[in-house]
Image: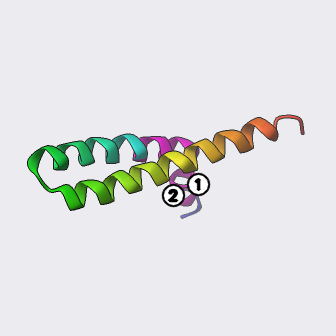
Amino acid sequence: MEILIRILSSKWMHLACCFINSIFASVTWQTGDYVIAVAVYCLAFYCGLNFVKAVKEDYYDQDK
């Protein structure tokens, strides 16, 4: 269970989540489901923001 938690909280999983959600949102936008597309774009933005925060943490923690 600990391995699964570590994998799901990885910064690379956040990046993958961002890409997958962006693709899904683009497809739903093209099919006309605008409400779902906006919601999924928000989730993609949130995943991308988490990735950026994780990268910044790694950058500032490299001095230790």
29 falls in the magenta region: no
Quarter of image, res 33 = bottom left
At 58% from the left and 54% from the top, the residue drawn is: 6
Q: Which residues are magenta?
A: 3-17
Q: Mark 1 sits on what residue?
A: 6
Where is residue 29 drawn, in percent x and y? 18, 48
Q: What colouring style does the render use?
A: rainbow
Crowd tier of the residue under label 1, counting other residues whose Cα lies within 10 Å: few below 14, some 14–19, many 20 or above: few
Give above or below for 16 relative to 2.
above
4 to the left or right of 43: right
Where is residue 30 drawn, in percent x and y? 13, 43
At 53% from the left and 64% from the top, the residue drawn is: 1
Question: Is the Cβ of the residue at disc 1 closer than 8 Å to that at disc 2?
Answer: yes
Give above or below for 35 relative to 10.
below
Q: Mark 2 sits on what residue?
A: 4
Where is residue 50 drawn, in percent x and y? 56, 50
At 37% from the left and 40% from the top, the residue drawn is: 19
Label 2: element kind? helix
Depth order, front residue of 64/48:
48
16 falls in the magenta region: yes
At 40% from the left and 56% from the top, the residue drawn is: 43
The amino acid type, in three-letter code, at marker 2 is Leu
Which image quadrant: the C terminus?
A: top right
